[in-house]
Amino acid sequence: MVPLPMNRRSVELIVAGQKVKVVSTATEDELRALAAAVTEKVEQVAPRGRPSTPQALVLAAMALAHDLEVERGRRQALERKTRDSVRRMLVRVDQVLEGNGDGRTPPSSV
């Protein structure tokens, strides 16, 4: 057996009823959680009581990819909203510092 580079480990997992050996830098707990997520998605898309097929695994992968794209879109929308809010706050701070915000001049620094 060839030794693995530092921080990489080999972990045997069960994914959708199939044994899979994975080499990764992720922890065993992380890999088991991912395997459980894939198994759960396969169970959602495959007929109950039947062994998982390659088609079920492909459907699960596509469903997970779709979930990822939806979440990516939400994150991007939140980033835009946050950026816009920060811009508006900075404009308001600049207005106040320049004395244009509420009609008062800012206190002079001594």
Image (cartoon, rainbow, N blue to C red):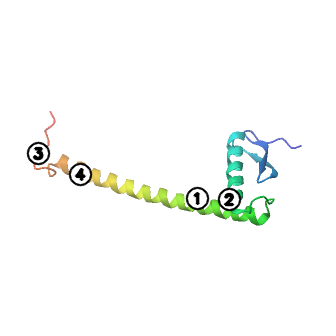
The residue positioned 18% from the left and 48% from the top of the image is 96
Q: Going by the image, does 47 lie left or right of 80?
A: right
Q: CA distance from mark 4 to mark 2?
A: 49 Å
Q: CA distance from mark 1 to mark 4?
A: 36 Å
Front position in the image: 49 or 86: 49
Q: Is residue 27 visible?
A: no
Q: Give the amino acid type for the residue marked by disc 3 in the picture.
A: Thr
Per the image, the residue denoted by label 1 is 68
Q: Give the amino acid type for the residue marked by disc 1 in the picture.
A: Leu
Q: Give the amino acid type for the residue marked by disc 2 in the picture.
A: Gln
Q: Going by the image, does 83 lie left or right of 4?
A: left
Per the image, the residue denoted by label 4 is 92
Mark 3 or mark 2, which is nearer the start of the sequence?
2
Circle 3 SS class: loop
Per the image, the residue denoted by label 3 is 105
Front position in the image: 96 or 29: 29
Q: Is residue 3 visible?
A: yes
The residue positioned 84% from the left and 41% from the top of the image is 3
Q: Residues within 10 Å of mark 4 (few under 14, many from 20)?
A: some
* Figure quadrant of residue 41: bottom right
Q: CA distance from mark 2 to mark 3?
A: 63 Å
Q: Is residue 54 above or below residue 39?
A: below
Q: Is residue 67 above or below residue 22?
A: below
Circle 4 SS class: helix
Q: Give the amino acid type for the residue marked by disc 4 in the picture.
A: Arg
Per the image, the residue denoted by label 2 is 44
